[in-house]
Image (cartoon, helix red, strand yellow):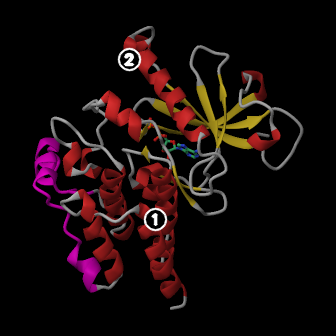
Amino acid sequence: LIKPMDRLSFYYPSRMIKQVGMIGEGNFCQVQKVEQVGPENEERVAAMKACHISNELKGTKAGRDACIEILHEARILAGFINYTYITMFYGICFDEPIPKLIMELCPYGSVESYVTNKDVKITTAEKVLMAHDIACGMKHLEECFCVHRDLAARNCLISAKGIVKVADFGLSRQARELESEKLRFNEFKAPVRWMAPECLTRHPNFSNKSDVWSYGMTLYEIFSEGRRPYEEENDMKKVARKIRSFQHPPIPPAIVEACVIPAEITALMKNCWSKETIGRPPFAFIALRLKHVGKAFATI
Ligand code: ADP
């Protein structure tokens, strides 16, 4: 199945796809595990993402927008085919009212669920490797002038080969689109805790550098066993106020004292949270830095 390079077309008729189980649900979308109906071969499974439109939303603008978002995500993903650190686009299914995105199945779930799982003991070397993979995916986006706008541990998925891949491009935009559209976030969907200060203003300024800020939050999640940034605060307005005044979440002292978190990582996190965007390192630098840190830990 579903090896795009072997196919002439990326369009999947629905008769080729058999749903075999539910993986999860987001705000507007649900993701299912699917199989191709056809001769047995190894690569039969995939993930299928579609918007779940409730009866009230059917035929409304919100319903149409949700469908457009899936197509938009497909368009972005299709530009990153065969890149190791980004979930692979397989195709799209159009022959029903709701379009569906078919992509690589990441059977080990999200980094968020992995790092919060109390039953697994994750080594520092493994955490550095996860952070490295995400930086490599984001480096590719940076090179392609694409801004993710929703980078967080929940949106990084673990592939069948154990590689961490950047996923969920529903809110992503090309840099030039950001300039012309002056997009505003729908407040309901805004991932405030991960957002950079310059994005929480009346005229938000999303860029690869605001993704770097969110990457710092993702590092924080990985190295603090899945704590959400500013976890102690539930009022989103207060969280936004903290971010606008450049307060980043404190690195839990217990974690620092136990040396669970290497000093290089703490320093990197703080660099990602630099007040001025120019002070935040590019993803190309972060990926390289983590490659070296990873080597040091792998040999311990
Ligand atoms: P939304 O865009 O509505 O937030 P998500 O993309 O977050 O939806 O997906 C919902 C759930 O499905 C999440 O739990 C996510 O981890 C899971 N998921 C999404 N894509 C895949 C995939 N390719 N492989 C495995 N699980 C996935």
Give the residue drawn at x 51%, y 62%: 136
**Nearest the eye: 65 or 289:** 289
Question: Tag 2, which secondary structure?
Answer: helix
Question: Tag 1, which secondary structure?
Answer: helix
The residue that disc 1 covers is 284
Q: Which residues are magenta?
A: 229-257
Residue 125 appears at what percent x and percent y?
Answer: 49, 79
Residue 280 appears at what percent x and percent y?
Answer: 29, 63
Q: Is residue 240 magenta?
A: yes
- Locate residue 291 relative to residue 277 in the image: left or right: right
Residue 60: quadrant of the picture: top left
| Mark sitting earlier along the chain (2/1) | 2
On screen, residue 114 above or below 37: below
Look at the image and tell me whether residue 286 can be seen.
yes
**Nearest the eye: 76 or 282:** 282
The quadrant of the rendering that contains the N terminus is top right
Residue 189: quadrant of the picture: top left
